[in-house]
Each structure stands twice: as structure tokens, then as C-alpha cells.
Image (tube, rainbow, N blue to C red):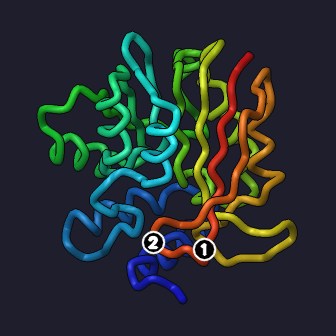
């Protein structure tokens, strides 16, 4: 069953894709949400539980390290990562989302910036000890997915770690997005350019044990 919160996102994404603009709908959604005319379905008021659980299990200590949060939205995951001690950069393609994160966390140490995953700043290449990709790639249509995955991977520093969280679908399963959940082969495709797969697991969605999610870790060797 479709969450009512997803209706606005689906409509805006369809309109954006019809205009051959795979990412323009993010700004439209955040702008409407800021005006009280839409909802952001992934803004749940707390960091992603699968990210928080992974970090606790790993005993992450970010002291002296840099982190990047991909598609940060309104900042919940970024603030969580910064709270682990990482010097954190978080980006979103939506200026309204970035402005909203700064307003929501006015005393934050996170560097919130506007940037495009399909054309990221060159200086981010190999710059981050931890990269968090939580449900952003799954929000992009299939024609640009490989490019997005490659750009995520490029930001990981030598010896760094990448955690990927996504909805799951079976190989060959057709879905109407967004999101377009990742298959296992798509998750495993993050293991390129010196990245090694540390773990790929299917875990229950924190809010619905009958729905599975991917949680994967990769390390640059």
C-alpha cells in the first residue's frame, strides 16, 4: 500500500521525468513542503534507524575524520553522523532542503551545501573517511543510476568506508517510482574503483518487519 506521504513525491517525480529532468523534482517537493503544501516522505524526525544501528554495532568514532552525507535532505542523518565526532559535510541538490537543514539546526557543526550527485565538486574525490548513502540513489531513475553510484564511490578516501541503505527489489522486478529500489547486483556495483565489499545484508524495515531493506558496507583498500 502506498503511504499517503509518497503521493506528492510520486506526482512531482513523474512530472520532472516527463521533462527529462531526473532530479528537478527534489527542489519542487521541498519548496512545496516549506510552504505547507506537500510532505517529504523520508523526513521522519529521526536519523535512519538502519544507519544508527550499523554505527552502534561498529562502534564508530569519527574523531579526526571527515564524513560526507549524500542527499542530506533536512539533516537528520547528517546531525547523527556529526554527533559521532566526524567533521561532516552534507549536501543536497535542493537549495530549499539545505536552507531548511540550516534553519532546523542553527548551531550545527555540519557544513550543509548545495551540490548535485550527478556533477559533484571535484575536490570531494577521495576526501572522506566515511560516506553515507541512505536512500538517495534509489530516488534516481535507472538511466542515471550507474553515474550516481560511480560518483558516490569516488568520494571515499583510501582506507575509508561507505555505508549504503536502500529499499530492496528482486532482479528483474518492475516498479513504478520513486523510489526505484535497488537489486542486489546494483548494491554490489558500489564495489568498484578499489572498493571492497565488507558486508551486504537484507534487514527488516524498522517500521515494518515484512518489508526488507539493503544495508551494505564497502571499504576502499
Asked which quadrant contains residue 37, the reply is bottom left
Classify 10 Å Cα crowding around label 1: few (below 14), some (14-19), many (20 and above).
Answer: few
From the viewer's perspective, is 14 left or right of 173? left
Can you say whether 33 is above or below 47 in the image?
below
Can you say whether 30 is above or below 102 in the image?
below
**Count of marks, rendered view:** 2
- Helix, strand or loop status at disc 2: loop
Can you say whether 191 is above or below 20 in the image?
above
* Residue at the extreme left of the image, as rendered: 107
Q: What residue is drawn where x is 27% and y is 67%?
A: 33
Can you say whether 2 is above or below 111 in the image?
below
Asked which quadrant contains residue 26, the reply is bottom left
- Helix, strand or loop status at disc 1: strand
Q: Which residue is mark 2?
A: 207
Q: Nearer the viewer, residue 14 or 138?
A: 138
Q: Which residue is mark 1?
A: 211
Q: At which x and y percent is residue 111?
A: 30, 27
Question: Which corner quadrant holds the N terminus?
Answer: bottom right
Q: What residue is drawn where x is 56% and y is 39%?
A: 117
The reply to whether callout 1 and callout 2 are in contact (CB within 8 Å) is yes
Disc assigned to residue 105: none
Amino acid at each position: 500500500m502506498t503511504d499517503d506521504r509518497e503521493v506528492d513525491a510520486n506526482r512531482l517525480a513523474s512530472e520532472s521525468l516527463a521533462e527529462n529532468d531526473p532530479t528537478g523534482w527534489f527542489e519542487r517537493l521541498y519548496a512545496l513542503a516549506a510552504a505547507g503544501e506537500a510532505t517529504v516522505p523520508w523526513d521522519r524526525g529521526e536519523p535512519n534507524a538502519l544507519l544508527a544501528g550499523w554505527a552502534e554495532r561498529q562502534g564508530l568514532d569519527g574523531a579526526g575524520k571527515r564524513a560526507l552525507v549524500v542527499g542530506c535532505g533536512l539533516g537528520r542523518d547528517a546531525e547523527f553522523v556529526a554527533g559521532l565526532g566526524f567533521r561532516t559535510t552534507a549536501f543536497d541538490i535542493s537549495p530549499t532542503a539545505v536552507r531548511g537543514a540550516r534553519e532546523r539546526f542553527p548551531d550545527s557543526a555540519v557544513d550543509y551545501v548545495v551540490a548535485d550527485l550527478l556533477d559533484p565538486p571535484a575536490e570531494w574525490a577521495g576526501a572522506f573517511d566515511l560516506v553515507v548513502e541512505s536512500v538517495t540513489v534509489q530516488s534516481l531513475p535507472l538511466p542515471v543510476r550507474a553515474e550516481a553510484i560511480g560518483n558516490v564511490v569516488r568520494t571515499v578516501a583510501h582506507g575509508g568506508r561507505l555505508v549504503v541503505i536502500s529499499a530492496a527489489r528482486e532482479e528483474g522486478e518492475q516498479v513504478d517510482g520513486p523510489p526505484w529500489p535497488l537489486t542486489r547486483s546494483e548494491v554490489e556495483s558500489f564495489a568498484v574503483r578499489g572498493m571492497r565489499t565488507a558486508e551486504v545484508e537484507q534487514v527488516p524495515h524498522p517500521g515494518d518487519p515484512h518489508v526488507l531493506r539493503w544495508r551494505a558496507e564497502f571499504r576502499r583498500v
